[in-house]
Image (tube, rainbow, N blue to C red):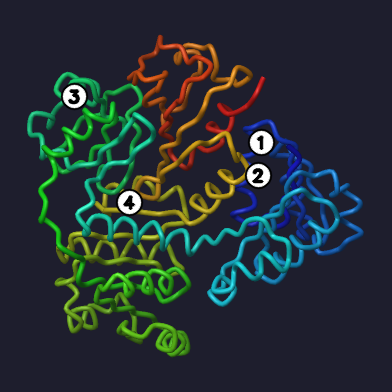
Amino acid sequence: MKIAIVGAGKLGLKIAEMLIGGDHAVTVIDKDEELIGRLGTSLDIMSVVGNGKEVSLLNEVGISSYDYLIATTDRDEKNIVIASTAKRLGVNKVIARLRDPEHMGQRGFIMESFGIDYVTNPDLGVAEEINKYLVEKYTLSNGVFYAGRVSMLEFIAEKIPELVGLTTKAAEQTLKGARVVAISKNGKVIVSGAGEILIGAEDDLYVIGERSIIDSLSKKVYERGKYTDIQKVMIAGGGKAGLYLAGMLEEFGASVKIIDSDKARCQYLSTHLHNVLILHGDATDVNLLRDENFGEMDAFVSVTGFDEENLLLALMAKQAGIEDVIAKISRESFGDLIESMGVDMALNPVDISANHILRFLQGSKIISSQIIQGQAELIQIAIEDDMVLSDKPIARLKLPEGMMIAAIQRGGKVIVPDEITRVEDGDRVIILSLLSDAFDLEKLLRTR
């Protein structure tokens, strides 16, 4: 496919890096001449200096021959105009990043009026994943994800004491027909790959297998009535992600407090959230937190605009004994630090938004997908005879550490594969992959 990306910020670059793995023809347009110069030498793409709103520039690059255009500049209005212009010039489908709640509130009208086919919002994506994590946990979810005859179950390892101390590979003997495909250690998701990860009592395990096996296991590890509802949540940061999340939790019925240091922002929040307590102050102020019964919260979410502040606040929340601590982190380099701190969930808005866009581009190749803890994804693919995956043993695919073929559904049979298992035409393959490994995942979906 021919794909144009207008805006070479974090999201635009992430998408470009993911797409070149899938053998697409990618063009990146940005006004920053120095940035475009660096891109041209570091990535196998066409890079163009210029304003993506200009019809003459779009015609110059032959935009009418493109399958997709993705507008990811720093302003919603620019993205709307660029996407709409490209659509009128003949691009098959256009995608725009929108962030303002006012625009998202009338998303359907904007898409219809300007001919935009898909809208992504990184802040809303983060809020939805956090809300799903908190609400599903506290609404007695049985933790099962379904993909045809294959199911995956999430539970804490201490529920089956005999698993503790084993490697993920050795655990298959105890699980009898199921396998541990990933572990969440202190909030960091690790795909088991070779199967030599040691299981700790506090680890969250992701186990996959045939539906009846997983359903039986679910009855063993889940206690109905352990959680009734989530009652108290504190959010540090009243930006867009904080606003979206507070609205969702408010609708669910939770008691929510937001702390933000910007007085004008607090006034804005108070007019848009009706049953949420808005606190003007510094979220790192220990006295303020003590006055607001910080340690009595069921969950603490840090979504300020600064990674360092989010990490500091998450550490403070953990030390205060709060059960669920969630942080928004934009830098992938902070991954190991997050694990050592014991944060329950860390999310990268760029990874989530880029993943949503990639799924839209892939269309019918993906039968279903499920994001796990904001860091990994379980996807189901129908294998066709011209795909790179087809008719090869798994060992020859040379999958990266953050990815594995977790299960294969062949007709009415579910196969838990090993390295010599061969993927066949017509199979439905379940792949587990870290969002950060989307480049390599795109390679697997290539056609010959």
On the picture, is 169 further left or further right than 273? left
SS of the residue under disc 3: helix
Kindly identify which numbered label has been placed on residue 16. 2
Q: Going 44% across and 68% down the picture, which residue do you hit? A: 241
- Mark 4 and mark 3: span between their CA atoms? 26 Å
Q: Position of residue 96 (x, y in %)?
A: 66, 60
The percent coordinates of residue 286 (x first, y second) are 23, 78
Foreground mark, 4 or 3, reads 3
Q: Looking at the figure, which quarter contains the N terminus?
A: top right
Q: Is residue 399 left or right of residue 362?
A: left
Q: Which mark is residue 171?
A: 3
Name the residue at 21% across, 21% down: 172
Q: Mark 4 is on which residue type?
A: Ile
What quarter of the picture does the C terminus occupy? top right
Q: Earlier in the sequence, mark 1 or mark 4?
A: 1
Identify residue for label 4: 338
Q: Which residue is mark 1?
A: 20
Which kind of residue does numbered mark 1 sit on? Ile
Name the secondary structure under disc 1.
helix
Residue 209 image label: none
Q: Seen in the image, is 224 located left or right of residue 346?
A: left
Numbered label tally = 4
* Sequence-first disc among 3 and 1: 1
Which badge, 4 or 3, comes first in the chain's sequence? 3
State the CA–CA distance, disc 3 to disc 1: 37 Å
